[in-house]
Amino acid sequence: MSPLSPNTIQSAKGAKHTSKRKGRGNSSGAGNYSGRGMKGQRARSGGRGGLKLKGFKTVLQSTPKLRGFKSLKTKPIEIRLSDLEKNYNDGETVNYKTLREKKLLTKSQLVAKIILKGELKKKVVVEGIRCTAGATEMIKKAGGEVK
């Protein structure tokens, strides 16, 4: 058997400390009043009251009410028409793959929507991405198309 088998392992000296047993006579070092002092509510069994919540009412009243629910649906990342104008050339297609390549979307961003902010003068083809009505109109006016 090796010297470090499970039945021979001991904790370091001073690591374990036994708690003082109160109320076991005066010779124990915690007899007589057993560390509770003299008379009073706290000297009695069960006399020590818990947390007093006196000033808690105002805190409760001041916190906003939690109502409704928070939807777990992912909200689309808004992509402006001005971003398309800067990053795309005439005739290019705008889809998730090209948006990631041009660093307009990250890998974790799964839903995108093109919104009407800025101007678009280039002909681009939008595939598989949601667009607002105004953005769709602007893309078509520039000579592009939305699929």
Image (tube, rainbow, N blue to C red):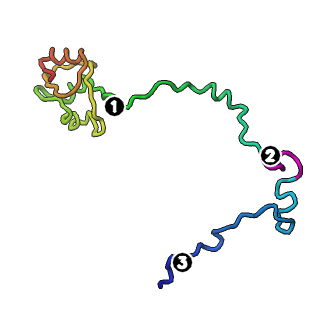
- Helix, strand or loop at label 3? It is loop
Could you say which is closer to the camera, residue 84 or residue 137?
A: 137
Determine whether label 2 and label 3 are within 8 Å by CB. Answer: no
Q: Crowdedness of circle 3 by 10 Å Cα count: few (<14), some, many (20+)?
A: few
Which quarter shows the C terminus?
top left
Mark nearer the viewer, 1 or 2? 2
Could you say which is closer to the camera, residue 45 or residue 115?
A: 45
Pointer 3 or 1: first along the chain: 3
Pointer 2 or 3: first along the chain: 3
> In the orientation shown, which residue stands out farthest toward the right?
39
Residue 47: which numbered mark, if any?
Answer: 2
- Prevailing SS of the magenta stretch: loop
Where, by quadrant of the figure, is residue 104 drawn? Answer: top left
> In the orientation shown, which residue stands out farthest toward the front?
45
- Helix, strand or loop at label 1? It is loop
Q: Crowdedness of circle 2 by 10 Å Cα count: few (<14), some, many (20+)?
A: few
Q: Identify the residue at image location x=38%, y=32%.
A: 72
Q: Which residue is mark 1?
A: 74
Circle 3: residue type: Asn
- Spatial CA distance of label 1 from label 2 is 53 Å
Residue 7: which numbered mark, if any?
Answer: 3
Q: Give the image location of residue 82, x and y in percent.
A: 24, 23
Figure check: 138 above or below 51 = above
Q: Give the image location of residue 17, x and y in percent.
A: 68, 67
Please give the range of residues in magenta.
38-46
Pointer 1 or 2: first along the chain: 2
Q: Is residue 78 left or right of residue 6?
A: left
Q: Is residue 8 left or right of residue 54?
A: left
Q: Tell whether position 43 is magenta.
A: yes
Q: Tell whether position 14 is magenta.
A: no
Where, by quadrant of the figure, is residue 125 drawn? Answer: top left
- Helix, strand or loop at label 2? It is loop
